[in-house]
Amino acid sequence: MKDTVTHLLAQAVEALQKQGLLDESAAQSINVERTRDSDHGDFASNLAMKLAKQTNSNPRELAQKILAELPQSGVIEKAAIAGPGFINFHLKKNAYLSVIDRIRHKNAEFGQSDIGHGQRIMVEFVSTNPTGPLHVGHGRGAAYGDALARVLRAAGYDTHSEYYINDGGRQMDILAVSVWLRYLQRCGREIQFPENAYQGNYVRDLAAQLKDKAGKSYCIDTSKLFKALPAAKEESIDRLISRCRKHLGDKDFRVLFDVGCDAMVDDIRQDLAEFGVVFQAWFSERSLLDNGDIDKSIKTLEENGHIYEKDGAKWFRATDFGDDKDRVVLRANGVHTYFASDIAYHYNKAERGFDKIINIFGADHHGYIKRLYASFEALGNSPEKLEFLLVQFAILYRCGEKISMSTRSGEFVTLRDLRDEVGNDAARFFYVLRKPDQHMDFDLDLAKSHSSDNPVYYIQYAHARICSVFRQLEQRGMQTPETAAPKNELLKEPQELDLLKSLSRFPEVVESAASGFAPHQVAYYLRDLAHVFHTYYNAHPFLSSADDVRLARLGLIDATRIVIANGLGLLGVSAPENM
C-alpha cells in the first residue's frame, strides 16, 4: 500500500516537473508514512512542506497543485490537505484485500524487496577471543548480528557474514600456559595456579586431551618455572609465558597454543551452529601475518605519510584523523601491536570490494572505534563505507535476582547453559527484542513461561493456532482456500481490517529494519501482529462460519501464518505447528 501511494506521488511530481514547477531533484523528497490516527487517513506525506522551501512557495498551495496532478487510483478513497501542508491519504476499505492473495502467492518470499540493489555488505560479529566457551554476552551479539544479516539479505543486499578469529596475541598465550599448567597438575606436579590464568573447567578438559592431541608427553621438569616471579599479577603471567616458551621451545609451545585454540574455535563454531548462527567465513588473525597484509597495510600508511618513528617504534598519526592520540603499530622489539592486526584486517576487508563494512562490537570496545575509523581513512578508504554497531551486555535475572559472571575466573553462564535452560527460540528472540545499544535485562523465568507475557511464546502460539485450524479442516474434510477460491470482499469486520492493515505493513518493516540496522523492529512488529490476530481469533468463529465467509477468513489467517513464519525466520526463530 505504501508503495502505491509513493508511486502516485511520483507521478504527480513528474507532471509538475514537466510544467516547470519543480526541479529534477523533487522526487527525492517524496516521503510517505503511515498515520498514527486513523482520522488522519492511512498514509501521510510532508512532500509539499519539503518542496515549498526549495520552490519558495506556500506549502498548502503546493500541496493543492500536487493533489491536482494525482492520477486516479482504485485504492484511494480521498486525499486531503491537513495542517500546514500535509497530504493525507484515505484508502478504500477494500484496498487492503489484495494483500491476502499477494502474501499467499509469494509465500516465503513475501516481505523481501530489492532496496539493497545487490550492494555488497560485510557483517562481522561475535569475533571473541577463542579463550573459552561463549557466554551470554556473546550470545546477544550473535543473535543480533545473524538477524541483521538475514534482514539485509531479505532487503536485497548481497550480505556476507564473517567471524574474525582472534587467534594471536597475549590472551591466547595465557590460554596455552593455562592448559599446560593444568596438564602438569594432572601429571602430579605441585603447582600454584595463577589467579589471572584461565580458571574454567574447560581448561582442565583441554589439559586432559593434550597428550592425545599433541602425540607426546609434556610432563617435564618445572622446578625453575615459578622462581622469583614479579609480585604484580599481569607482569607475573607475562614472565610465565616467556619462561614457558623458553622451557618448551617455540615448536612445542605452538603445539600447546594450537591445541587450546583449535579446540575452542571448534567449540564456538558448534555452539553457534546449534544456535542457528552459521558464518560464511571464519577469518584467522594469524593469516594476516602469513599473507603479508600487516606489512602491506603499514607500508601503505607509510607511503601515505601517516607513519613516523619514535623511540625505535613505528607510530600511526591517528590524531590527524580525530583520534585522541597517536598509536603504536610496530614496537621497538619488532613485534606488531594488536592494533596493527586490526588495521590489516580492515585493509583486507577493503581489498575485497565491499560497499559497506559493518563491525558489531561489544559496548566495552567503543574506545577502538575512533582509531579504526582513522586508520581506515588513512589507508585511502572512504569512512562512510565503515559502520560500527555496539551491543550492550545482557544481564541475566532468575527469580528477580541478578546472576553475576566473570570470564577469567571461569564463573560465568555460557551461551550453551542459556540455550539449555530457555531454548534457542526464546534466547534469540529476547536478545533482539531491544535495540542492541540498550542495556538488556534477560528474565529467565519469563523466557520459559507459557503465557501472553512471554512475547516469543505469544507469537509462536498464534502460528500454532492457525495450523491447528487447518488440521481440523482436514480432519473434517472441509473446503480450504486451496480447494475453493475465497471471496475476500466478505471480510468486513473491524478486526479483519485491522489484521489486513497489519499484514500489509510487513514489507515496510523489513525495509526499515534493514535500512536502520534494526532487526528489533521485526520483533516489535510480530508482537503487535500476534496481538491483532489473537484478538480476531477470540472474537470470530472460523469453522462454524457460513461457507463463503469461512473460506475468506481462512485465507486471511493463512496469510497471517505466512507472515509470522517469515518474520520469525528473519530472527532465526522457529514457527512451530504444535504447542
Image: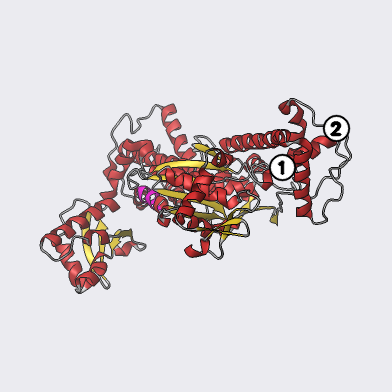
Residue 83 figure quarter: bottom left
User: Which mark, residue 52?
Assistant: none
Residue labelled with disc 1: 175
* Amino acid marked by disc 2: Cys
**Marks 2 and 1 close (CB-CB < 8 Å):** no
Name the main secondary structure of what is drawn in magenta: helix
- Identify the secondary structure beneath mark 2: loop
In the image, the segment drawn in magenta is 506-512
Quick one: quadrant of the C terminus? top right
Picture coordinates of residue 95, whole percent (x, y): 26, 50
Q: Nearer the viewer, residue 293 or 362?
A: 293
Q: Nearer the viewer, residue 418 or 280?
A: 280
> From this viewpoint, is residue 261 visible?
yes
Q: Residues within 10 Å of mark 1 (few under 14, many from 20)?
A: many
Residue at (13, 59) in percent of width and height:
15
> Is 340 included in the stretch rendered in magenta?
no
> From this viewpoint, is residue 564 visible?
no
- Identify the secondary structure beneath mark 1: helix
* Amino acid marked by disc 1: Leu
Q: CA distance from mark 2 to mark 1?
A: 19 Å
Residue at (15, 54) in percent of width and height:
72
Residue labelled with disc 2: 187
Picture coordinates of residue 216, whole percent (x, y): 77, 26
Picture coordinates of residue 555, whole percent (x, y): 35, 38
Q: Nearer the viewer, residue 51 or 397?
A: 51
Q: Is 510 left or right of 198, judged from the image as shown?
A: left
Q: Is 381 left or right of 449, judged from the image as shown?
A: left
How many numbered circles are shown? 2
